[in-house]
Image (spheres, rainbow, N blue to C red):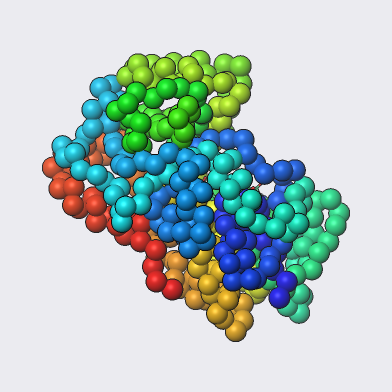
Amino acid sequence: MRIAIIGGGITGLTTALALKKFNIEASVFESFSDLRIEGAGVWMQPNALKVFDFLAIKEDIISNGTSLTKVELLNGKTLIPFQNTNSNLVENGNLPIVAMHRGRLLETLYSKLNPEKVHFNKRLESLSEHNNNISLKFEDGSEEKFDLVLGADGIHSAVRKSVFDDTSLRYSGQTCWRGIADFNMPNNFLATGNETWLNNKRFGFSNINAKQVYWFAVEKAEENETDETHLVKEKVSMKFSEFHPLINQIINATERNSIFRNDISDLKRLKTWSKGNVCLLGDAGHATTPNMGQGACQGIEDAYFIAHYLKESESAAEAFTKFEQKRRKKVDSIVNQSWQFGQMAHSTLGRTISIALMKILPASIMQKQLEKVYELEAI
Ligand SMILES: Cc1cc2nc3c(=O)[nH]c(=O)nc-3n(C[C@H](O)[C@H](O)[C@H](O)COP(=O)(O)OP(=O)(O)OC[C@H]3O[C@@H](n4cnc5c(N)ncnc54)[C@H](O)[C@@H]3O)c2cc1C
């Protein structure tokens, strides 16, 4: 069976690797001219690490990032945790959260694939299906035919737009700057993921290796606002000037052209992720807001399950049905929780209530919630 994966991001490359594990070759088509190694950091949580373990690359991932033993919510002014307890919130079967550069993650995945099967400079324009044959039309004028197509081309998916009519995004009202700073982290933050809150703003940071810190800064904003590159660092620094001085030191240690801005949106729930012999994976099918740090982790889970079901099923339809039955509940729950977390964190009342709850709720309740997220269900 000829399988095409559209998109060579985290979901697409992990899917190719998971299929390879079962000796199923797939061709990946990526619009960029090379691996997209620019960009920010990413937190790979234990559910993703379980998939990487299955793919026998867990140790590569761990050695290319920083292992975090807990994620804490801190007061932005004092950097003191809101939680009263000192418990380890992310501990899960001894699996850490790995904070790493996105580029290092993509390089690690790509290095395990047959490079001849990953085609760069191939932007999909549209696809059409006739008699179980799918024609892919690329922007460079070329056309290819496949039996089955997996759309892993992100939140603005061309595959999704070719197959489904109603695919709108939902803007959260928040915008996010991300950067990577050359910075020596103080010892007490070396192995923690940190998210700080002050007034209506959030600033998160963690080490991604011995010399670099990944950070994100979130505030409410109108959609589609832009920055002048030569002023962006000063702008973010000013916006977060009332935070603890460490935060401004981190921002100031960042190259201005390595600061990225994205409006935070998710994808309106699709009724189904597949049609005919085409199935959507990762952000293409269920982009979530980043508040739980689970978007890419969910794409990685998709890769694991779709590969299993394609291997064991008689037909694509059977595989896609099993895939959706397995994945829907968890994905929907994460998209909804993440949305609510973002709305609550940027409302005065919501923040006050959550901080009060964090102070009184036993750590075991938080732990239980996380265990559900970190679980990789049985096939
Ligand atoms: C601020 C922020 C912080 C985040 N932090 C985390 C985190 O800590 N942990 C986490 O798990 N998730 C995080 N996420 C979510 C995560 O970034 C996404 O869920 C993840 O990148 C989705 O991966 P993907 O491969 O499905 O899509 P993408 O990363 O969007 O990759 C899609 C790929 O397809 C290619 N492509 C697009 N269109 C076409 C086309 N027409 N033809 C061919 N190729 C195409 C693109 O070039 C790209 O390489 C965060 C998101 C944001 C915005």
Is residue 35 something that shows in the picture? yes
Residue 118 vertical position relative to residue 305 in the rendered view, above or below: above
Furthest-bottom residue in view?
314
Q: Where residue 264 sits in the image (x, y, percent)?
A: 49, 40
Q: Residue at x 54, y 32 (%)?
A: 261
Q: Where residue 171 sits in the image (x, y, percent)?
A: 49, 43
Q: Where residue 313 sits in the image (x, y, percent)?
A: 56, 81
Residue 127 vertical position relative to residue 141 in the rendered view, above or below: below
Tell me which corner region of the image, top left, top right, bottom left or bottom right, holds residue 228. top right
Q: Residue at x 56, y 31 (%)?
A: 260
Q: Where residue 363 sits in the image (x, y, percent)?
A: 18, 47
- Which quarter of the image is occupied by the N terminus? bottom right
Is residue 177 something that shows in the picture? no
Residue 273 vertical position relative to residue 114 in the rendered view, above or below: below
Left or right side of 97 for 260: right
Furthest-right residue in view?
141
Label tally: 0
Q: Residue at x 43, y 73 (%)?
A: 379
Left or right side of 197 for 56: right
Q: Residue at x 76, y 57 (%)?
A: 116
Q: Nearer the viewer, residue 259 or 13?
A: 13
Q: Nearer the viewer, residue 340 or 2?
A: 2
